[in-house]
Amino acid sequence: AFMNLVSNAVKYSKNSRSVNIGYSGNKKELTVSVQDAGIGIPKEQQPRIFEKFFRADNAVSQTAVGTGLGLYFVKAVVEAHEGKISFESVQNKGTTFFVTLPV
C-alpha cells in the first residue's frame, strides 16, 4: 500500500519537486502521510478517487501510465487492517494521502 502511494506521488509530481513522507501517532494509532507537489486531483473528481479503474482527467492526459487500480487496492488493504485512508488535494498544487492504522 505504501509503495503504491509513494510511487503515485513520484509519478504525478513535477520533475523538480520532492515527495515528503511523515508520520505521527499515539498509543492507539499511527498515521503515515505521503505528500507531493504534483498535478493534484480535480475537486469534482475527488469523490471517485478510490473507485476501481478510475483515473482523474488530468492523470489520464499525463504521459504517466496506470490502470486506475492502485488506490482501489490501497484502500482495500488499509481497511483490511482496520485502518482508514483519506487525502487532501488541490489541482496543480499537490496531494497528501493519510493512512491511519491501529497500533
Image (tube, helix red, strand yellow):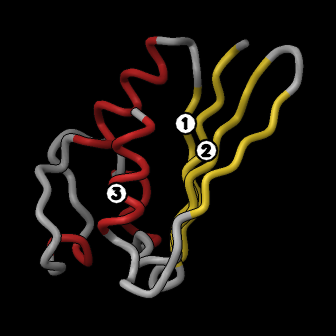
Q: Give the distance between the C-alpha atoms of the residues marked 2 and 3, in whole angstroms.
A: 14 Å
For the residue labelled by badge 1, is the local secondary structure a helix, a strand or a loop? strand
Viewer-proximal residue, 17 or 61? 17
Percent position of residue 73, x then y:
29, 31
Three-letter code, disc 1: Ile
Please tell me which of labels 2 and 1 falls first in the chain: 1
Eye-nearest disc, 1 or 3: 3
Using the rendered view, name the quadrant where residue 1 is placed: top left
Badge 1 is on which residue? 85
Q: Earlier in the sequence, mark 2 or mark 3?
A: 3
Q: Position of residue 2 (x, y in %)?
A: 45, 37
Disc 3 marks a residue whose amino acid type is: Asn
- For label 1, count other residues whose C-alpha is less than 10 Å away and answer few (under 14), some (14-19) or many (20+): many
Name the residue beneath numbered marker 3: 8
Residue designated by label 2? 98
Left or right placement of residue 99 versus residue 51 in this view: right
